[in-house]
Image: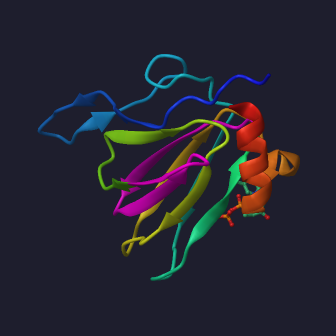
């Protein structure tokens, strides 16, 4: 049997207050439970657009609203949870095998995604029924 996927988690990052401007950072295996292999970002999202709506077989992610705000909706095969991200000093850990949608982007929202894998189209599950099947197999 496969290993059961972990739980999503909001993770607070270090914040170094400074009158010259604040600074935050994230380190692999220190603040997030995986090694970062790739970073990508989503920006210039027109009002009302939805990104994502897929799951990953193995990829884990950590999502930060570097600027602006948006929602991340996660489905674990049984229930859905919505997380609102609007600060650059915390983020959402998304374990593998979660159906993930990003929506309600504010003007100038910048979503930074740290990923545990390099880009691999074969890791995507793009059909919700296929996701439910894969998730049930992992439970
Ligand atoms: P995708 O992950 O499907 O974004 P969304 O689900 O929000 O539409 O990525 C969109 C396109 O970008 C897709 O054709 C693949 C490409 N892409 C890469 O080439 N490398 C990457 O690291 C990512 C995330 C996407």
Q: Quadrant of the C terminus?
A: top right
Q: Position of residue 95 (x, y in %)?
A: 59, 36
- Identify which residue is drawn at 63% across, 36% down: 60
The quadrant in which residue 118 appears is top right
- Identify which residue is drawn at 50% across, 51% down: 79
Q: Position of residue 29 (x, y in %)?
A: 53, 17
- Residue 22 or residue 67, whichever sits in front: 67
Q: Is residue 61 magenta?
A: yes
Q: Position of residue 132 (x, y in %)?
A: 72, 51
**Quadrant field for ligand 1:** bottom right
- Identify which residue is drawn at 53% across, 79% down: 49
Q: Position of residue 50 (x, y in %)?
A: 56, 73
Where 41 sits versus 18, above or below?
Answer: below
Where 53 sits versus 59, above or below?
Answer: below
Left or right: 112, with 3 as reference point: left
- Residue 126 or residue 31, whichever sits in front: 126
The magenta segment: 58-82
- Identify which residue is drawn at 43% across, 23% down: 31
Left or right: 44, with 67 as reference point: right
Residue reaching furthest top? 30
Residue reaching furthest bottom? 47
- Residue 121 or residue 139, whichever sits in front: 139
- Residue 9 or residue 79, whichever sits in front: 79
Where 118 sits versus 66, above or below?
Answer: above
Where 128 sits versus 75, above or below?
Answer: below
Q: Main secondary structure of the magenta part?
A: strand
Q: Quadrant of the N terminus?
A: top right
The quadrant in which residue 119 appears is top right
Q: Is residue 4 magenta?
A: no
Residue reaching furthest right? 122
Left or right: 137, with 87 as reference point: right
């Amino acid at each position: 049997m496969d290993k059961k996927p972990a739980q999503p988690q909001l993770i607070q990052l270090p914040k170094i207050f400074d009158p010259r401007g604040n600074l935050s950072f994230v380190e692999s295996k220190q603040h997030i439970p995986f090694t970062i292999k790739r970073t990508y970002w989503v920006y210039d999202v027109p009002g009302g657009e939805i990104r994502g709506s897929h799951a990953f077989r193995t990829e884990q992610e950590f999502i930060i609203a570097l600027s602006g705000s948006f929602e991340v909706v996660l489905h674990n095969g049984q229930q859905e949870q919505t997380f609102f991200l609007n600060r650059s000093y915390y983020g959402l850990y998304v374990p593998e095998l979660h159906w993930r949608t990003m929506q309600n982007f504010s003007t100038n929202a910048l979503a930074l995604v740290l990923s545990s894998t390099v880009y691999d189209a074969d890791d995507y599950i793009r059909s919700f029924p296929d996701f439910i099947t894969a998730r049930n197999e992992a439970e």
